[in-house]
Amino acid sequence: MRFDPFESRLCRDIRNRLGHAFVLALQAKDIRPFTEAADPYPADTTPWPIRDYIRHRQTCLTGLIENFHARQLKPEHEGVISLLLWNLELFYEFHEWMEIQWQSASGLNKKAFQALILCAVTHEHFLYGRKIPAQKAAAKALVLLNEYRDALPKGFDADLLIQTISDPDPLPPKFSVPV
């Protein structure tokens, strides 16, 4: 068994449950919503790929929350939080986080957020070896990136995103995070 939310209903349910809890924990700057969501999957009875997935997410979340406290990040710093999630390659969690921003956005910003969400979807599919769905998401993202590039949140380089998702087997770019 490997952790694959596109092939396993259990993995998909866990990814979705923990992804939602991850974002709640980020908003609260408290790991408890995540640990509570992970409670039904005890280490002694949960298959190792799921345990590793949960452990990795929990480690990343703990580091992010420590980073938030060190940087004194507030809710209005959602762009910095987005960059941190992206650089950790937590594309599902990035998608969840950006969807919140997307829902309250309008006009050009809404389309730019949609482009970033599609970039995350692209990389999430590539991560699990799903080339055709990744290429479909990339094609949609490219249209939006080209049109709404100037509305991307600070720190996201449109040219780099376009170059990366245009590659048939891309590695996700890393972005500078403001101090």
Image (tube, grey):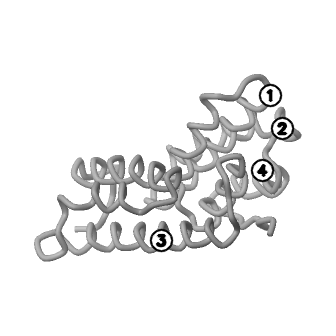
- State the residue position of label 3: 62
Graded by Cα atoms within 10 Å as few (under 14), some (14 to 19) or many (20 or more), the crowding at tag 4 reads some
Instruction: Identify which amino acid the numbered label 4 is placed on.
Output: Ile
Graded by Cα atoms within 10 Å as few (under 14), some (14 to 19) or many (20 or more), the crowding at tag 2 reads some
Q: Residue at x 31, y 49 (%)?
A: 12
Determine which quarter of the picture holds residue 137: top right
Q: Is residue 99 left or right of residue 106?
A: left
Residue nearest the observer in this picture, 118 or 126 = 118
Determine which quarter of the picture holds residue 106: top right
CA distance for labels 2 and 4: 14 Å
Element marked by disc 2? helix
Q: Can residue 127 be seen?
A: yes
- State the residue position of label 4: 162
Instruction: Identify which amino acid the numbered label 2 is placed on.
Output: Ala
User: How far across and down, in percent of the image, does residue 32 sit?
Assistant: 36, 60
CA distance for labels 1 and 4: 18 Å
Instruction: Identify which amino acid the numbered label 1 is placed on.
Output: Leu
Q: Is residue 41 left or right of residue 108?
A: left
Q: Which mark is residue 151?
A: 2
Sequence-wise, which precedes: disc 2 or disc 4? 2
Q: Are marks 2 and 4 in contact (CB under 8 Å)?
A: no
Residue nearest the observer in this picture, 156 or 100 = 100
Q: Is 171 located above or below residue 132 in the figure?
A: below
Q: Residue at x 17, y 58 (%)?
A: 40
Q: Are marks 1 and 2 in contact (CB under 8 Å)?
A: yes
Element marked by disc 1? helix
CA distance for labels 1 and 2: 6 Å
Screen quadrant of the C terminus: bottom right
CA distance for labels 1 and 3: 33 Å
Element marked by disc 3? helix
Element marked by disc 4? helix
Sequence-wise, which precedes: disc 1 or disc 2? 1
